[in-house]
């Protein structure tokens, strides 16, 4: 028996590897989403919005844009490729600014490692002040 997956669809080992890694990836994605929802719950509560909105997948983006101080309609920019990356950086910087954090904190901890930054804002001493 060989341990290297092949492209042969009849290869049992390749199918086992695909099943194992797809399940593992799904579990990690679910864990990441739950942690992010917990962090955003606290951020939304500090900003004066109901915390349960952090659980709903599309709605949490709309209200995150509102926490950034922009209209919720701007969240439609997340649907445009390339623009969504730039817009998510802008939202992260504005959210950080509204919580009294600088641009470097916002870029690295609210955009690049978002679950860590939102935990720091949500459970830390940062106060929401809309600019």
Image (cartoon, rainbow, N blue to C red):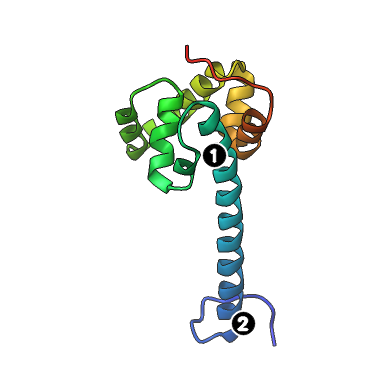
Q: Which of 71/27 is in front?
A: 71
Looking at the picture, how far across and down is residue 9, in whole percent? Answer: 48, 82
Looking at the picture, how far across and down is residue 115, in whole percent? Answer: 61, 39
Count of residue discs: 2
Q: Is residue 34 visible?
A: yes
Q: Could you give the CA–CA distance between mark 2 and mark 1, rounded to whole angstroms?
A: 42 Å
* Residue lying farthest to the top in this orientation: 131
Q: Is residue 120 left or right of residue 63?
A: right
Residue 35 to residue 19: above or below: above
Looking at the picture, how far across and down is residue 1, in whole percent? Answer: 70, 88
Q: Is residue 21 left or right of residue 76?
A: right
**Residues at marks 2 and 1 touching, judged by CB atoms closer than 8 Å:** no
Q: Which of 24/74 is in front?
A: 74
Which quarter of the picture shows residue 27?
Answer: bottom right
- Which label number is shown at residue 10? none
Q: Which of 19/46 is in front?
A: 46
Going from N to C along the chain, the mark reached first, 2 or 1, is 2
Looking at the picture, how far across and down is residue 34, in whole percent? Answer: 57, 51
Q: What residue lies at 61% left-to-right and 55% top-to-bottom?
A: 31
Mark 2 highlights which residue? Answer: 13
Residue 90 to residue 111: above or below: above
Element at label 2: helix
Mark 1 highlights which residue? Answer: 41
Q: Is residue 124 left or right of residue 110?
A: right
Which quarter of the picture shows residue 72?
Answer: top left
Q: What residue lies at 56% left-to-right and 21% top-to-bottom?
A: 96
Which is in the foreground here, disc 2 or disc 1?
A: 1
Element at label 1: helix
Residue neighbourhood size for the residue with mark 1, other residues' Cα within 10 Å, grouped as few (<14), some (14–19), many (≥20) = many
């Amino acid at each position: 028996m060989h341990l290297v997956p092949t492209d042969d669809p009849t290869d049992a080992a390749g199918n086992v590897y695909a099943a194992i890694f797809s399940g593992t990836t799904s579990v990690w994605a679910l864990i990441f989403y739950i942690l992010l929802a917990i962090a955003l719950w606290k951020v939304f509560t500090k900003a004066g919005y109901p915390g349960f909105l952090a659980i709903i997948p599309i709605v949490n983006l709309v209200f995150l844009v509102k926490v950034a101080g922009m209209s919720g309609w701007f969240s439609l920019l997340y649907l445009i490729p390339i623009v969504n990356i730039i817009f998510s950086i802008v939202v992260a910087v504005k959210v950080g600014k509204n919580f009294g954090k600088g641009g470097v904190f916002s870029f690295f901890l609210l955009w690049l490692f978002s679950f860590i930054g939102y935990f720091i804002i949500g459970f830390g001493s940062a106060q929401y002040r809309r600019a």
